[in-house]
Image: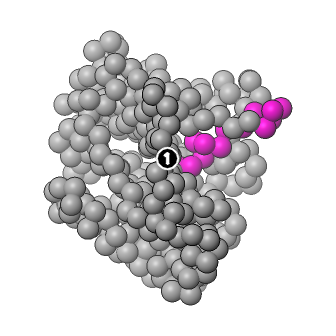
Amino acid sequence: MTLLVDAYYTIGKLHLFCQDYASRGIDLFPYVILADGCSATPDTDLGARLLALDARRLLRRFALAATDQRQRVIQHGRLGERIVRRAARQARDLGVDTTVLDATLLIAWCRGETVYVHLYGDGCVAARRVDGTVIAIEIEYAENAPYYLSYRLDPEREALYQAAINDPATAQRVYCWSKTGVTIRHEPFDTPILFSFDLAAFPRVLVATDGLHSLVNVETQERLDSLAVAREVLDFHDLAGAFVQRRLREVLTGYRQQGVFNIDDIGVGAFVNLDEEADMDTPTTRGTFV
């Protein structure tokens, strides 16, 4: 299997600086890591980078150890705990408060012909089937307040968080869009969220921060739905080089011409199984591949 992987992040229209971060690579196996700092907390651009870089360092052992779905569920919390505690030590060494780690984290990697996705907080996941149809998944939290890994560092902050979201037993909402409509699932705030996609059935897999759902028409104030945006971003016309960066820029430029802007920062990564792209000419220069 020839696999392409790429990632990119960009600032939102209402932000003075970008609080998202994206990392991708093929060290041992292809991976994409995205982080999204909280706008209400100072210096979370730093925290997002610390979490993402620590995740990159710790992912290898986790991905090799978690060989089935049951083990991945068990290890999900342990991986998050190790990442945030390592990042907290680094934050203290830098002389900053550990609240800089108020950031969501999304980790995706490929082993064999399967892409595995783990989320710590909100975010978006989409995939395109061989027949061209797209599914999109969005994870949201009550009061627009994700459950950050940093809350695990401070029992008092975690208790305040649970009080603020009213009903912790249903605070996490998982939306799934497909050609048949949308389904909504409610989960406790700390339920592990993980997915897997067979690249033979879904040759294009997209992961994104919640900024993918922040595209708003400035005249009507209507927000574009995640499925429509995911379709656009997954429609890679050229898989050469930095194909995610190029496609996201094209999509956002097209939307701006229609008066639609991403209010929030956006971080995006994608995996493409080139062997299943039979209807597309093979690019002479590919993206990162294995």
Q: Is residue 99 visible?
A: no
The image position of residue 84, as x and y in percent, is: 43, 74
* In-front residue for pair 126/245: 126
Q: Is residue 216 magenta?
A: yes
- The answer to whether residue 145 is above or below residue 8 is below
- Which quadrant is home to the C terminus? top left
Q: Quadrant of residue 259?
A: top right
The residue identified by callout 1 is 184
Q: Quadrant of residue 225?
A: top right
The image position of residue 55, as x and y in percent, is: 37, 63
* In-front residue for pair 240/29: 29
- The local secondary structure at tag 1 comes to strand
The image position of residue 240, as x and y in percent, is: 40, 25
Q: Is residue 183 magenta?
A: no
Q: Amino acid at mark 1?
A: Ile
Left or right side of 271 for 93: right
Point 51% across, 60% down: residue: 172
Q: Quadrant of residue 219?
A: top right
Q: Is residue 263 visible?
A: yes
Left or right side of 157 for 204: left
The image position of residue 15, as x and y in percent, is: 73, 52
Point 35% across, 54% down: residue: 194
Range drawn in magenta: 209-221
